[in-house]
Image (spheres, grey):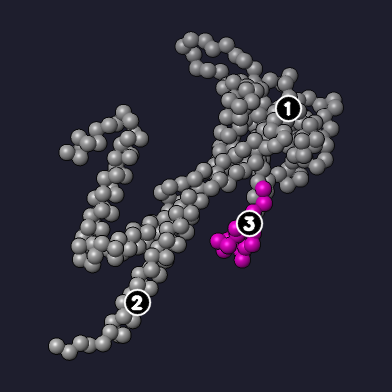
Amino acid sequence: MIASMLAVAWQPEIRGILVVLIMVVVLIGGTYLIVGTNIGARLGFLVAMAGFFGWMMSMALIWWVYGIGLKGNEPSWKPSEPIAIVRDPANLHSAEVIESSVKTEGLSTAEAAAAASEQMVAEGWVKLDDADPRRGQAAASSDDLLQNKAEEFKAGEYLTVAVYDRGGERWPKINESLDFLAFFHKPRYAVVEVAPVIQQRAEPGRAPARPVVDEAQSHRYVVMLRDLGNKRQPAMFITLGSGIIFLLLCWVLHRREAYVMANRSAATPVRA
């Protein structure tokens, strides 16, 4: 019977509404019906609602701690403002990526890129290793920016050369291992260096040729800023809201119990 009622897979929103309605009627309504028949309709409603919001607070607190359940936006890389793509190593200084300008006069494209890389490392940028997972995340975000948003290149027209990372320090810290109180952080930046490749003809029946960097074009630099997101924010709001309502209901129940006890103690016995 339940399977027949929920056989609306072509409209997931209707299925979700039906699931929530059945849950409210069966679980919350059933609990209120049992409690209300024993202690009365009004008092049973208060007890049922206090139990419901107490359970909501406990569930959302687990979501908040472990980052599960109803989640907000995940951390991601966003294009830096106002300049997100630097099309020449000589412009890294004007884009405020490095403090000192790079002299590229008389240098080839590869030599200019190498000079820019040395300058970035000297100023505190960390060049990530190829096996570092942070490199893959930043490179994937730069691919989306270059191909879909800026339409600078198409897939297969460039090669990721290096990824640089800087910033993101958290504070205050007790020591390097105890950082659970480090709620504040500095902005974290990443620069992805890409190089255009020479377009090669694909021959049927043969493996694709290895990409060759086009020495006639300068390297591009994608500047991105780390957005920490709000992954635990919905769970935090549910925890706080449900906790406030739960405490208010508990206070109402305590106040009612105090009135009942006061009335019972003040009542005078009547002789038969």
Magenta residues, as a range?
170-187
Identify the disc placed on residue 87.
Answer: 1
Q: Secondary structure at mark 1?
A: loop
- Determine crowd level at label 2: few under 14, some 14-19, many 20+ residues with C-alpha closer than 10 A: few
Could you tell me if the residues under marks 1 and 2 are in contact, i.e. CB atoms within 8 Å? no
Q: Amino acid at mark 3?
A: Phe
- Determine crowd level at label 1: few under 14, some 14-19, many 20+ residues with C-alpha closer than 10 A: some
Image position of 7 with respect to 263: above or below: above
- Whether residue 14 appears in this view of the structure is yes
- At horizontal 64% and vertical 25% (from top left) the residue drawn is 150
Left or right position of 206 against 145 = left
Residue 124 point in image, percent of width and height: 73, 47
Q: Secondary structure at mark 3?
A: strand
Numbered circles on residues, count: 3
Which residue corresponds to mark 2? 259
Which residue corresponds to mark 3? 184
Give me the C-alpha separation between circle 2 and circle 3: 48 Å
Image position of 200 with respect to 93: above or below: above
Left or right position of 198 against 99 = left
- At horizontal 80% and vertical 35% (from top left) the residue drawn is 94
Rendered image quadrant of residue 21: top left
Image position of 23 with respect to 31: above or below: above
Q: Earlier in the sequence, mark 1 or mark 2?
A: 1
Q: Secondary structure at mark 2?
A: helix
- For the view shown, which residue lies furthest in the bottom direction? 271
